[in-house]
Structures are given as structure tokens and as C-alpha cells.
Amino acid sequence: MIKGVGIDMVPLAQMQRQLPHEHFIRRVFTADERAMFDREPHRRLARMAGNFAVKEALSKALGTGLAGCPLGDVSVLRNESGAPYVQAAGRAAQKLSELGATKIWVSITNTQDMAIAQVILEGEE
């Protein structure tokens, strides 16, 4: 059963403006995400924008907005084939549990100018 759906888009230019601001990077992205960005410097901007879009989409799927889903509680990582997945902690994990969401489906796409993400939360009836 679908427990929530969210979608978001982030202009790459908006993320590009944030790159020099280390405080922003540390507040928004977890240590695991930052390590992933460092391993793929040629994809850094697109990955960062995509991850940010996932976090926004997740907050919408949870019905909380960012106030109820702190960005640092969510890691958006990639499996060995490159597919994104979410690891939630803190308030984000608590809200997922309250909703009965047991699976988080994530899709990210990029254009030359945008990163777009969709999140679908699934759980038992």
C-alpha cells in the first residue's frame, strides 16, 4: 500500500552557488554522502542536487516538510549498480515508522539544468 508520494526538482545552478559554503554542505549532507561525492568529483554537482531533491521529496512524502524531516537525518546513497536508496535516522525514521512505511522507492533524473527526484513510501495495509 502506498503511504506517501513526493517529488522535487533542484536547479543545478542553485546547488552550484552552495558549493563554496562548507557549513551548508555539512548541515545538509551526511558524512557518507560527502564521502560518496568525493569519490566521484565529476558527478559531484549532479549528485548533490539529486540528493537534495530526494530529501525534499521525502519530506513531502512524509507530509512533514523539512521541519519534520531534518536533512541530516537522511542519507541518499547508491548501491553497487548506481541505484539510489535512502537511509533514515532520527525524526525521519520515526515518522516513517509512524506511517507504517517499510520500503522507500527512490528515482532521480538529471537534465543539463535540473535534478528531479521522486519518492514513494510503501507499507502494509
Image (cartoon, rainbow, N blue to C red):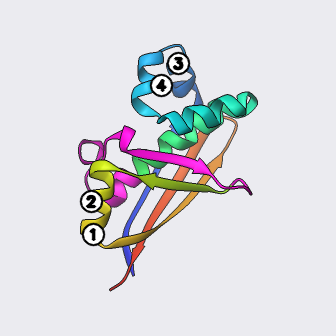
Examine the rendered structure and indicate whether residue 65 appears above or below residue 42: below
View extreme (bottom): residue = 125
Count neighbours of disc 2 (C-alpha within 10 A) and say few if under 14, some if 14 to 19, many if 20 or more. some
Any magenta on residue 59?
yes
Local secondary structure at mark 4? helix
Amino acid type of the residue tagged 4 in the rendering: Ile
Quadrant, the C terminus: bottom left
Query: Which residue matches tag 2?
Result: 95
Residue at the spot 74% in from the left edge and 57% down from the top edge:
81
Residue range (magenta)? 58-82
Amino acid type of the residue tagged 1 in the rendering: Leu
Q: Nearer the viewer, residue 4 or 88?
A: 88
Query: Which residue matches tag 3?
Result: 17
Q: Give the alpha-carbon distance from disc 1 to disc 3, as whole Å.
A: 35 Å
Quadrant, the N terminus: bottom left
Count neighbours of disc 1 (C-alpha within 10 A) and say few if under 14, some if 14 to 19, many if 20 or more. some
Residue at the spot 34% in from the left edge and 54% down from the top edge:
60
Examine the rendered structure and indicate whether residue 70 appears above or below residue 24: below
Q: Give the alpha-carbon distance from disc 3 to disc 4, as whole Å.
A: 11 Å
Disc nearest the viewer among 1 and 3: 1
In the drawing, does residue 22 fall left or right of residue 82?
A: left
